[in-house]
Amino acid sequence: MANGRVWEHSEEIRLVQGSQDLVVPHPYRLLVIEDERDMVHLIGYTLRRAGYEVFCAATVEEALDLIERIGLPHMAIVDLMLPGAGGFEFCRRVQEFSDLPILIISAIHDKDTIIRGIRLYAEDYITKPFDPQELVARVERVLRRIGSFAYALQPVIRVDNNLAIDFARQQAYVRGAPVTMTPLETKILYILMRNAGRPVSTDFLLRRLWPCEEVYEDALRVHIHRLRQKIEPDPSRASYIITQRGVGYLFPPASN
């Protein structure tokens, strides 16, 4: 990976079809951001053997470009010591417009760095060297907690004939017409769509949108209102961002 190449299904780290170790494909897609070749091989092999679909990038820019091309993954596994912009920069940029679960893997054992990573960005933090089975267990733990994303993660996610979403470009398509969303509006929509069919509490949204600030429900209502004005056929009778009184908000489940 030192040459900066993006490996999507590299022969060097992909399990061969027909191998005894190959298991039934897992519904989750993982993005690994790591520039050390041997580590890419280890992580990629381990996760593919566990049945995950794995894409790899060596730098922050390559990772963001990959997301634009193939869509958001279900989870990102991020090294902190990357060429150019470091792993924290990827976390910051991707979480401006999404609530992508992140697992940090790093040779940095510094207590302050670990606390910063978990407090601001990551669901978990693993220090190198690590046991491959520990990695699988931690990935499984995070994914069990977030549940599956019912909408297929594609560059442009088609909700129905009226609405499609491009998270990476922070853009909605309403009856085919492009509509620009703010990063915060995009993140709200990502959280609600990831939990499609299940109410998302106001408290949860506030914690995920403003993890280090004290923000009140009125501020969230303003952003919800603006988002509805952009994507709802009739903002006064919401069909995508549905208020669940006393609870929060609901995005309808994906239709079959």
Image (cartoon, helix red, strand yellow):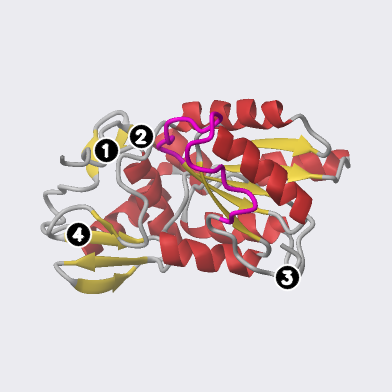
Q: Secondary structure at mark 2?
A: strand
What span is in magenta? 10-28
Quadrant in the picture for the C terminus: top left
> Which tag is nearer the camera, tag 4 or tag 3?
3
Q: Is residue 34 above or below residue 19?
A: below
Kind of residue indicated by mark 2: Val
Local crowd size for mark 3, using a 10 Å CA cut-off: few (<14), some (14–19), many (≥20): few
Kind of residue indicated by mark 4: Leu
Residue 248 falls in image quadrant = top left
First of labels 1, 2 by sequence position: 2
Query: What is the chief secondary structure element of the magenta stretch?
Result: loop
Kind of residue indicated by mark 3: Asn
| Viewer-closest of 135 and 148 | 135
Question: For the residues marked 3 and 1, what is the alpha-carbon distance in whole angstroms?
Answer: 44 Å
Classify residue 243 as left or right of residue 152.
left
Give the labeled residue for mark 2: 200
Question: For the residues marked 3 and 2, what is the alpha-carbon distance in whole angstroms?
Answer: 42 Å
On residue 163, the disc is: 4
